[in-house]
């Protein structure tokens, strides 16, 4: 997800006053959360995977709002480059990180 946002930012979204900086922020946050999910001890995986799931969910909702009516003055087309890929990556990542967070809760309760 972060790479997609960085790519779109570098391809011209950075010039969009309303959302350009948010694409760069999404990249930075995505990289930080990805590193944390990989690197934290198991006891902190609930928090980091949960935060990643929330970020992916927020990004997914923002894309859907942008496609279906506009967000912060920007309207994305459903057939825009990377729109479908973003939906799959964000949706799949959300499911995987939410499952990881829930599995970590189960592990911590039974550890």
Image: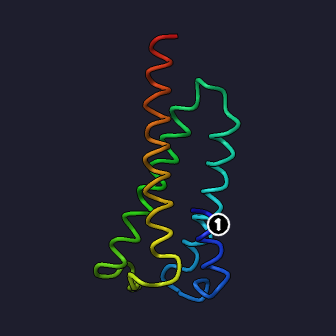
Q: Residue at x 49, y 19 (%)?
A: 107
98 lies left or right of 43? left
Q: Is 52 placed above or below 67 here? A: above
Judging depth in this view, the residue of 89 and 6 nearest the camera is 89
Residue 106 position, x and y percent, is 44, 21
Q: Is 21 placed above or below 3 here? A: below
Residue 23 position, x and y percent, is 57, 72
The residue lying furthest to the top in this view is 111
Q: Is 49 placed above or below 65 here? A: above
Residue 10 position, x and y percent, is 67, 81
Q: Is 21 placed above or below 32 here? A: below
70 lies left or right of 15? left
Judging depth in this view, the residue of 59 and 79 nearest the camera is 79
Q: State which quarter of the image contains the N terminus.
A: bottom right
Kindly identify which residue carries mark 1: 3
Residue 27 position, x and y percent, is 63, 64
Quarter of the view holding residue 41: top right
Q: Residues within 10 Å of mark 1 (few under 14, many from 20)?
A: some
Q: Residue at x 43, y 31 (%)?
A: 102
Q: Residue at x 60, y 70 (%)?
A: 4
Judging depth in this view, the residue of 5 and 78 nearest the camera is 78
11 lies left or right of 48? right
């Amino acid at each position: 997800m972060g790479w997609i946002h960085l790519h779109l930012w570098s391809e011209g979204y950075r010039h969009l006053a309303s959302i350009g900086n948010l694409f760069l922020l999404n990249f930075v946050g995505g990289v930080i959360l990805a590193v944390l999910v990989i690197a934290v001890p198991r006891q902190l995986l609930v928090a980091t995977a949960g935060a990643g799931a929330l970020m992916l969910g927020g990004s997914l909702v923002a894309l859907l709002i942008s496609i279906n009516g506009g967000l912060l003055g920007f309207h994305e087309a459903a057939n825009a480059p990377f729109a479908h890929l973003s939906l799959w990556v964000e949706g799949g990542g959300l499911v995987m990180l939410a499952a990881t967070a829930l599995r970590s809760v189960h592990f911590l309760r039974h550890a």
